[in-house]
Image (spheres, rainbow, N blue to C red):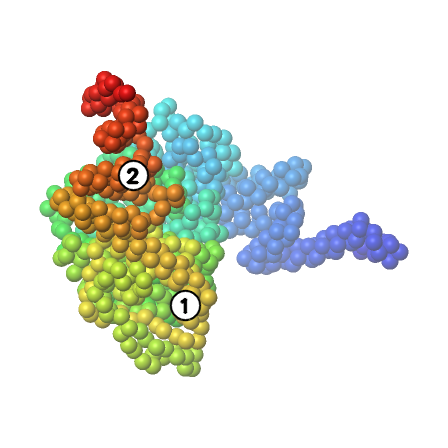
């Protein structure tokens, strides 16, 4: 190898641009390096230092995944550590690349004898994982890879039962492929499609394991996740079901080790009363097979909530246990059954809850009667102040809250979040790119479960009675959908690396003014709480606004809902002049967005004025004060946008009604010419009203403009052939002898 390297080096000395020689030199040098590593690994194997040897061999295979000697040695290590099926897979790979490799053949023959002995020990199977599949071809390979990589599977303690519910896709071919290389994979295909719970029942009846778990095709597990759950059942004989937490992703076929998290499921410790309110077990539990002997199987009449019913059924007698670790990866997808069938899920859940509410041993908890509040926190590169903000939520006197933190592509704050998981019900989401505060808040709103929504920036704080104050008011004053308190503005300066509050003031303490909000914001974001349903009516935060997005939302809410002001200081927001706060950090953005929102507010204000003029004109018209109505309608019309513009349908309709009623007011004050002019304006806006043409014809007739009158009556009948009055008027004018 050294001679060849020198030969190519000589060529390069004569011809430095010879790419073939250059590549050969690099290849040979690489092989020399790999050979040295391989010799080092073999020495470690002789010394039974398998862990270090494995790492070296894996490094070799990352460079050359067909390195036969490295593969053979890796198989030897797996056999020595009793990872028999891993060793089989490695040796099969060797023979696929080199079918005559004698070392691999001999090792594989020996290995098959060991596996045969192992398979005779049926007691080794501790856990049966149920995989129910239908139209899941794109997930099944990843699912099986996930399960065969479980530590419990490698120890021979896990079997996999695949129930193919007559899927039209080709999951079977993939399962067959795995069955050729892996043991303890059972495959059953049904003759017709059945519910997921019928599939689970079918698998449970043939399961060898002492424990059962469901392995959804699109979810994944931590490599030791199933082993941890099984160990908990081993160590807690009074517990029949265990469950862990999950990380949420929205990307298909990721693994627990490599994924893009968008949130987490942080489940509470087991509580029977809470379970009646929420299915708080999560998607990846493990339970004892024996409970089916006592309680029967899943009720397969349910399509999406049968597991919830069974958990409630067995919880009447036995305990569950929550494992506060992230043991699985959950795929949130609009194509999943729970998202496709949300209405059905709600229906089935209500039926199940009503059934178990009647049982005497489940008592309602008082806290369950309280409304849930979702507190939304966008955060970006401020882990220190985020921690303080979260501490202020922990200190709340009102406890029925969930906290939703959205990291807007800032530095990782998961370590901060994790320190609060035992004190807060917390959801955590991460943006892959910075989208600004509006988008961060919208992400949180999308995942909010509360009746009410409150907001807290990552550098602000709530006082302990903040949430209780607002909830108490809104729960006892149904007229209001939005309420707000007062806040201190905390002037802060940096000292020794920390921000210190130097002074506080109350800049705003105003009762709500529906005109004032249109020209300036006087409600700091942390002060406000509103019904979540308000968002359904007025929409979410405007993501085109880099600032003043809260003011914009308050304006929109003010056009639909009543606001209440509670004169009490319950929070504070920071104010810094060093550029670290929004107000002083982005002046150009602030100026631009202030003007954008102000123009929107002015537009709404003008619209309110115009609407008021039309309302006063309408009131005068209805009361018979026609001269006053004429003045009011003329002023309202003059103030309105020109009909030559492209007006929204509601404005066009309002203007049409104004001209129509103005014409009738002129008629009642004997001003025929003005009435004709007003009717003609109305026709320009809407020319499909038979009544207005008939009325206009009558006015033309009164002015002896018979041709114009006849045209109007004919037009009215063209629109409505059954319009009797127009028909009579046309006959009358046609019978006249006009000289």
Q: Position of residue 708 (x, y in %)?
A: 30, 28
**Location of residue 515 by image quarter:** bottom left
Q: Position of residue 33 (x, y in %)?
A: 70, 57
Specify the label residue 582 is tagged with: 1
Q: Position of residue 691 (x, y in %)?
A: 24, 30
**Could you tell me if residue 250 is visible in this image?**
yes
On screen, residue 138 versus residue 655, left or right, reads right
Give neighbour class at mark 1: few <14, some 14-19, many 20+ (Cα, 10 Å). Answer: some
On screen, residue 562 versus residue 208, left or right, reads left
Specify the label residue 170 is tagged with: none
Residue 528 vs 652, above or below: the answer is below
The residue most toward the front is: 739
The residue most toward the right is: 14
Q: Looking at the image, which residue is at 41% across and 29% down?
A: 167
Q: Looking at the image, which residue is at 35% across and 56% down?
A: 600
- What is the tally of numbered marks visible in this picture? 2
Query: In the depicted view, which residue is nearer to us: 460 or 449?
Result: 460
Q: CA distance from mark 2 to mark 1?
A: 56 Å
Q: Looking at the image, which residue is at 13% across and 57% down?
A: 476
Q: Secondary structure at mark 2?
A: helix
Specify the label residue 677 is tagged with: 2
């Amino acid at each position: 190898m050294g001679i060849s390297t020198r030969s190519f080096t000589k060529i390069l000395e004569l011809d430095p641009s010879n790419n073939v020689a250059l590549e050969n030199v690099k290849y040979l040098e690489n092989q020399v390096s790999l050979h040295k590593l391989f010799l080092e690994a073999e020495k470690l194997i002789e010394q039974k230092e398998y862990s270090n040897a494995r790492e070296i061999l894996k490094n070799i295979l990352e460079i050359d995944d067909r390195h036969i000697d490295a593969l053979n040695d890796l198989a030897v290590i797996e056999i020595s550590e009793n990872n028999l099926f891993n060793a089989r897979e490695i040796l099969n790979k060797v023979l696929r690349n080199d079918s005559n490799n004698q070392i691999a053949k001999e090792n594989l023959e020996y290995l098959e004898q060991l596996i045969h002995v192992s398979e005779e020990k049926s007691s080794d199977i501790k856990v049966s994982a149920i995989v129910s599949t239908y139209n899941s071809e794109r997930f099944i390979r990843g699912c099986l890879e996930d399960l065969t990589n479980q530590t419990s599977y490698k120890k021979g303690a896990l079997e996999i039962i695949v129930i193919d519910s007559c899927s039209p896709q080709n999951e079977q071919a993939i399962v067959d492929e795995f069955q050729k290389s892996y043991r303890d994979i059972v495959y059953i295909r049904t003759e017709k499609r059945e519910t997921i719970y019928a599939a689970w029942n079918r698998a449970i009846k043939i399961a060898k394991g002492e424990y059962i778990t469901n392995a959804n095709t699109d979810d994944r597990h931590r490599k030791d996740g199933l082993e941890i759950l099984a160990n908990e059942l081993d160590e807690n004989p009074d517990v029949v079901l265990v469950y862990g937490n999950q990380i949420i992703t929205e990307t298909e076929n990721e693994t627990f080790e490599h994924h893009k998290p968008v949130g987490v499921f942080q489940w509470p410790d087991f509580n029977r009363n809470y379970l009646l309110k929420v299915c708080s077990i999560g998607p990846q539990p493990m339970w004892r097979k024996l409970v089916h002997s006592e309680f029967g199987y899943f009720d397969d009449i349910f399509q999406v909530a049968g597991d919830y019913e069974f958990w409630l059924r067995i919880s009447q007698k036995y305990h569950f246990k929550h494992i506060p670790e992230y043991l699985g990866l959950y795929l949130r997808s609009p194509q999943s059954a729970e998202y496709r069938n949300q209405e059905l899920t709600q229906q089935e859940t209500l039926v199940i809850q009503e059934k178990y509410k009647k049982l005497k041993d489940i008592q309602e908890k008082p806290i369950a009667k309280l409304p849930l509040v979702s507190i939304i926190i966008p955060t970006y590169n401020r882990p220190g102040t985020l921690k303080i903000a979260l501490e202020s939520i922990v200190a709340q006197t009102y406890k029925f809250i969930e906290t939703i933190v959205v990291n807007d592509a800032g530095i990782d704050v998961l370590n901060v979040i994790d320190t609060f998981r035992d004190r807060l019900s917390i959801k955590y989401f991460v943006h892959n790119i910075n989208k600004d505060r509006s988008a961060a808040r919208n992400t949180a709103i999308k995942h909010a479960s509360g009746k009410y929504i409150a907001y807290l920036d990552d550098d602000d704080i709530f006082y302990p009675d903040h949430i209780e104050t607002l909830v108490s008011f809104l729960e006892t004053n149904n007229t209001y959908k939005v309420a707000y308190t007062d806040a201190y503005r905390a002037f802060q300066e940096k000292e020794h690396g920390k921000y210190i509050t130097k002074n506080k003031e109350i800049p705003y303490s105003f009762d709500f003014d529906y005109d004032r909000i249109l020209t300036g914001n006087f409600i700091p974001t942390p002060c406000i709480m509103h019904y979540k349903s308000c968002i359904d009516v007025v929409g979410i935060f405007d993501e085109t606004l880099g600032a003043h997005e809260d003011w914009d939302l308050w304006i929109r809410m003010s056009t639909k809902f009543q606001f209440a002001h509670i004169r009490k200081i319950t929070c504070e927001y920071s104010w810094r002049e060093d550029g670290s706060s929004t107000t002083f950090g982005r002046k150009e953005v602030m100026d631009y967005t202030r003007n954008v929102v102000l123009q929107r507010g002015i537009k709404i204000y003008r619209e309110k004025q115009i609407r008021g003029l039309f309302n006063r004109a309408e009131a005068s018209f209805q009361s018979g004060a026609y001269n006053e109505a004429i003045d009011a309608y003329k002023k309202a019309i003059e103030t309105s946008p020109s009909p030559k513009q492209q007006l929204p349908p509601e404005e066009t309709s309002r203007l049409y009604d104004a001209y129509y009623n103005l014409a009738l007011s002129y008629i009642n004050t004997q001003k025929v010419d003005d009435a004709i002019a007003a009717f003609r304006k109305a026709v320009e806006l809407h020319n499909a009203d038979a009544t207005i043409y008939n009325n206009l014809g009558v006015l033309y007739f009164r002015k002896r403009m018979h041709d114009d009158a006849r045209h109007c009556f004919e037009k009215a009948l063209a629109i409505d052939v059954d319009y009797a009055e127009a028909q009579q008027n046309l006959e009358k004018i046609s019978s006249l002898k006009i000289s």
